[in-house]
Image (cartoon, grey):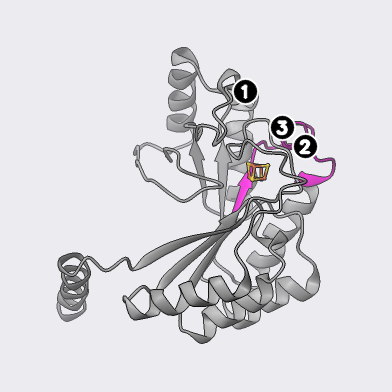
């Protein structure tokens, strides 16, 4: 154990001292099939088509290998809408990257889900905005979003993949925190809660009205305490589910 710990320390010192970006985030596309009321993209997500070509991504992957990166997070928009997702995913795995994927969970099919599970995905993080279909679907403005995401969350869990849920806390879903914690506890799936919204890339202030006010933040913290989430862990995770404080 002592040997493992010192090897780990040694590795982290090497990474830090040599400024190695061991963890990279690739925003594959700004295209999304959902239309979340708090979205930071600030464009018409359903029409957006801004993405790097496969050749450009390929070149980035090789550069990352050269500078010592070994973890990649795929995010977006919705990464499954990136036209070359399968190719990028397979290539990244061949190059030895550990992969985390952040998704809204509505666009899997058996083929793509099996590919991720079989070739190996280190973590799949699902963005959830409610403990019920009614709340989640109204926030994402996508009918059926909750049921689809919940189905695939359970599917990946069954395949023994590392699945986590990120609950975006807003004034309109604050009341479902406890229910969400219970729901995912039953499935033995870790859930984190984040209340800080990423400002919109276009500068519009639409999402501001859904942000928690001071009183609601106190309520959220008290509910989290009640749910047994006592430590306040501040972590900057990549968008889309993140860039927010997580508890
Ligand atoms: S917040 Fe994420 S899931 Fe929602 S519309 Fe924006 S990119 Fe899509």
Q: Earlier in the sequence, mark 1 or mark 2?
A: 2
Quadrant housing the N terminus: bottom left
Q: Residues within 10 Å of mark 3 (few under 14, many from 20)?
A: many
Query: 96 or 161, which is in the foreground?
Result: 96
Q: Nearer the viewer, residue 52 or 113?
A: 52
Q: Looking at the image, is mark 1 or mark 3 earlier in the sequence? A: 3
Q: Quadrant of the C terminus?
A: top left
- The kind of secondary structure element at disc 1 is helix
For the record, the magenta segment spans 125-146
Q: Position of residue 20 (x, y in %)?
A: 26, 69
Q: CA distance from mark 1 to mark 3?
A: 13 Å
Residue name at image x 62 percent, y 23 percent: 206
Q: Position of residue 183 (x, y in %)?
A: 65, 44
Disc 2 from disc 3: Cα separation: 5 Å
Residue on which disc 1 sits: 206
- For disc 2, the marked residue is 137
The numbered disc on residue 139 is 3
Q: Residue 84 appears in which quarter of the rendering?
A: bottom right
Density class for disc 1 (Cα within 10 Å; few <14, some 14-19, many ≥20) is: some
| Disc assigned to residue 234 | none
Q: Residue at x 44, y 15 (%)?
A: 214
Q: Disc 1 or disc 3, which is closer to the eye?
A: 1
C-alpha gap between disc 1 and disc 2: 18 Å
Judge whether residue 125 can be spotted in this image. no
Q: Magenta stretch containing residue 139, yes or no?
A: yes
Disc 1 and disc 3 in contact, CB within 8 angstroms: no
In reply to whether residue 225 is colored magenta, the answer given is no
């Amino acid at each position: 154990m002592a040997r493992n710990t010192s090897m780990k320390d040694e590795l982290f010192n090497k990474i830090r001292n040599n400024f190695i970006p061991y963890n990279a985030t690739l925003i594959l596309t700004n295209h999304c099939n959902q239309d979340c009321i708090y979205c930071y993209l600030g464009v018409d997500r359903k029409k957006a088509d801004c993405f790097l070509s496969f050749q450009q991504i390929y070149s980035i992957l090789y550069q990352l290998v050269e500078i010592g990166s070994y973890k990649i997070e795929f995010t977006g928009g919705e990464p499954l809408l990136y036209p070359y997702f399968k190719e990028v995913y397979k290539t990244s795995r061949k190059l030895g990257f550990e992969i985390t994927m952040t998704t809204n969970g509505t666009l899997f099919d058996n083929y793509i889900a099996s590919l991720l599970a079989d070739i190996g995905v280190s973590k799949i993080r699902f963005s959830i905005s409610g403990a019920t279909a009614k709340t989640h679907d109204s926030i994402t403005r996508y009918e059926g979003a909750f049921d689809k995401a919940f189905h695939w969350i359970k599917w990946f869990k069954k395949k023994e993949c590392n699945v986590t849920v990120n609950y975006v806390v807003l004034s309109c879903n604050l009341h479902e925190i406890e229910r969400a914690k219970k729901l995912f506890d039953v499935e033995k799936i870790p859930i984190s809660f984040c209340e800080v919204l990423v400002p919109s890339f276009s500068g519009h202030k639409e999402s501001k009205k859904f942000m928690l006010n001071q009183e609601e933040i106190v309520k959220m913290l008290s509910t989290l305490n009640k749910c047994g989430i006592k430590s306040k862990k501040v972590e900057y995770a990549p968008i889309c589910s993140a860039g927010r404080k997580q508890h």
